[in-house]
Image: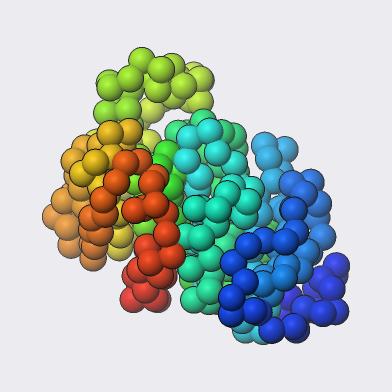
Amino acid sequence: MLCLLAGLPAACTAPRSETASIRTVTPSASSDTWRLEADGRATRAVPDPQGAAQLVVPGRCRKASCPLVIVSHGRGGQALDGITHPPFDTLLDAIDAQGYVLLLSNDGGRETWGSPGALAYIRRVYRAAQPHVQGDGRVYTLGISMGGLPATLTAYRQTLGVKVRATALVAGRVNLSDAVRTSARRAASIRRAYGTASLAGHDPVNDFATFRGRRTPLLTVVSPQDMAVGSAANGVRLAHLARGVGADVRVIQVQGPHLSRGYMNADIGRQIALFFKAHP
C-alpha cells in the first residue's frame, strides 16, 4: 500500500475531507517524493526527460488495490493541469473519488497529437509508475481535446502491453485528417510533432478498421456548440464506427463551447467513472 512506500508521510491515514476541493499544495514537476494534500490525496511526479507525469492517489487507493486511469491533456497543456487548473481538476476529482488512481500524462510535450513519441512517452511513464501504486491490473484512458488522440490510440494500438478496459473522450480530437485539413496552423503543428514519421496508423477515425483494439468500450462527451473540435467529424463519428464493430458506446451531449463548464464539471467526471466501472 502507498502508506508503506518510501517518502509518503506517516499522516497518510488521515481521512479525506468531504468538502475539500481546492488543492493546498503546489506540486513540483521535478519532485520524486510523495506529497499529502489537505483533501487526503497523495501525489507525486513520475520523472521523464520529456516532462514529468503526475500520479494522483485518492485515500481509498492507499489502502486497497485500485484501477488506473491514464489522462492525456489538451493542446498546449501539460500534466500539471490536472492538479492545478480548476475546471480540469474538478472533472478529475470526481473520477478519482470513485476509487481510481490517476496517471496524468505529459504526452511528451504540449502539442504531440498522438505521435509515435507521445505513445512511447505514455508507455514509459506507465511502466515507471508501476512500483509506486498498488494497482488491480485494470487500466483505462481518458483524453481531453487533443488528448483524445493518444487516449484512443493507446487503447486501439494496444501499446501498453495490457488491455485498456475502456476509453473516454471529453471534446476529444480523434480525426487527425480533419485536423490537418481544416487549419493550416494545426497542420503545421502536427507536422512538427511527427517529424519524419508517417501519420498512417495514428488516425482513430480514418484508420479505424486497422486497429486491433477497436472494440474497446468508448464514452465520448460532445457539444453541438463546439467550434474548435467539431463533434460530427470527431467524437460522434468515432462512436458510429465503434458501434459498427460491436463496441459498447455511450455518447453524452452537453451544451457550450470547447472545454466550457458544460464539458468540465464533476457530473461528467462521475459519469466517466461509472462507465469505467461498467467495464471491469
Can you say whether 164 is above or below 152 in the image? below
**Left or right of residue 157: residue 30:** right
* Residue 185 placement (x, y as % from top left): 41, 17
In this picture the colour scheme is rainbow
- The residue sitting at 31% across, 36% down in the picture is 229
**Left or right of residue 155: residue 214:** left
- The residue sitting at 73% across, 75% down in the picture is 2
Can you say whether 257 is above or below 100 in the image? above
Q: Which residue is nearer to you in this view: 189 or 85?
A: 85
Residue 71 is at least partly visible in this image = yes
Which residue is situated farthest in the front direction here?
19
**Left or right of residue 109: residue 44:** right
* Residue 104 placement (x, y as % from top left): 58, 53
Residue 172 is at least partly visible in this image = no
**Quadrant in which the N terminus appears:** bottom right
* Residue 110 placement (x, y as % from top left): 56, 33
- The residue sitting at 66% across, 79% down in the picture is 16
Q: Which residue is nearer to you in this view: 27 or 236?
A: 27
* Residue 66 placement (x, y as % from top left): 56, 76
| Quarter assignment of residue 277 | bottom left
**Quadrant in which the C terminus appears:** bottom left
Q: Which residue is nearer to you in this view: 116 or 22?
A: 22
- The residue sitting at 53% across, 69% down in the picture is 96
Can you say whether 200 is above or below 17 in the image? above
